[in-house]
Image: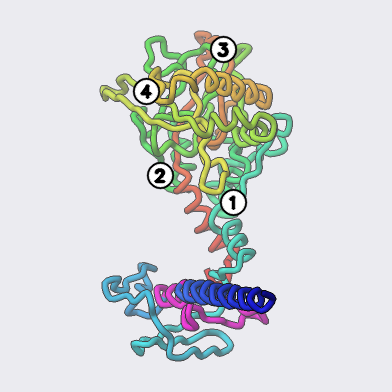
Amino acid sequence: MILLRSLRDTNKKVTLLNLFQTVVQTNKLHLNSVLPNKDDFVNINLQGNSLKYPSVWLRDNCQCEQCFHQSAKSRILNLCKFNVNVSIKSVVQDETSVQVTWDDDHVSRYALNWLKFRSFMPEDQLKYTKTLYRPVKTPWHGKDFHKVCAKHDYERILYSEAALYKWLQDLSTYGVALIQNTPNCDTALDGIVEKIGFTKRTHYGVKFIVENVANTSNVAYLSSNLQMHVDLPYYEYCPGVNMLHCLVQTLSEGGENLLSDGHHTASYMKNNYPDQYKLLTDIEVEWSDVGVEHGNEFFKLYRSSVICLDRHGYVKRINFSVPQRGSHFPGPIETVKPWYEAHSLFYELNQKFAAQFKTEAGDILVFDNIRLLHGRSAYEDKSDNVRKLIGAYVDWDEIYSRLRCLKAKLNPLEGI
């Protein structure tokens, strides 16, 4: 009986051992099928650090004349002949560069500082993002407005690249900047725009005039109170930056600007009202504009949430405009009232966090149109004092591009 039990236990152990070996072998085969082979990465010593680069990435970014057009700064290798499973014959490193010979005898050479600038180390990638890709945005409360809204001189921006860079850097970081001492003419704004690139044309024109018009196609062209909003949320490619040149400011009470940082408000809601925040990030509503301007009929529709997030969960765009939110609600009926409650809360908080100030003739108020909500208090024109502003839009693509060009020139980055 004891012997029989012993045999059973032995058989059971053998069975379990066989099963364990099978599982290990199966997992080993599976792991081998996904782990990279020895040629999938190249280790390069840079300033005492060992940095790893994928072989396929190195081959794709060969800088020789057959693979890369130097003046166009563009890759020209033939993708039809590109081998994703490329292998390496040899790697030779000297003091300034690395030479890789591939399995097809093609030779690539890479400068060490070029490789360092494109390091795959997380800390290096973060540095690249902050220094070249886009400046880090700093949210602010209205009480700190006069600390974050830097003042810049019109003539200095036109004739000093350092001043131009400083203005664009401040605008990118805080979403707002003020240009002062602007000439009192309708074309003064053109000079500033030309230092960046060019305007974004909309159905309101290349530029637009903001003054009281009785029979208008836009409520911004009235002298009554203008609720805080972003301009043109019904554009899929919404104008990134709004520039408002004050030619004549009202002498009456009112006409004051309101500005609120939507990023600050969104962050506050996320921390204190997470359910309402989620509604404003998840539910798409319809934005619209219908009318005629300069003889051109338009019927614009675009669907998007109030708070738009990128894949990392950071706010990338704010949509908000009571007049330009369409009456069609494309979401589920049971979400309508909770959404309205969250929407109202968002606006109340922006009013609470807003800065209030009044520009003067000669000021150009420049602000991020997909980040900041702006509005204006009611005012009254007089026969000898008619409030008038000239406005224009510029896309962030153009501003970031000019910033990078200036950085490369004024503060050269090694390996760029």
Closer mark to the observer between disc 1 and disc 2: 1
Q: To which residue does mark 3 refer?
A: 379
Secondary structure of the residue carrying tag 2 is loop
Q: Earlier in the sequence, mark 2 or mark 3?
A: 2
User: Which residue range is magenta in the image?
Assistant: 34-61
Q: Amino acid at mark 4?
A: Asp
Identify the residue shown where x is 32% and y is 74%: 77
Q: Residues within 10 Å of mark 2 (few under 14, many from 20)?
A: some
- Closer-to-camera residue (16/414): 16
Q: Amino acid at mark 1?
A: Pro
Q: Is residue 243 visible?
A: no
Q: Residues within 10 Å of mark 3 (few under 14, many from 20)?
A: some
Q: Looking at the rendered structure, which numbered label has been put on residue 135?
A: 1
Picture quadrant of residue 353: top right
Q: Is residue 160 visible?
A: yes
- Closer-to-camera residue (365/66): 66
Q: Earlier in the sequence, mark 3 or mark 4?
A: 4
CA gap, disc 1 to disc 4? Answer: 32 Å
Q: Earlier in the sequence, mark 1 or mark 2?
A: 1
Picture quadrant of residue 345: top right
Q: Most extreme residue toward the front, as rendered?
A: 1
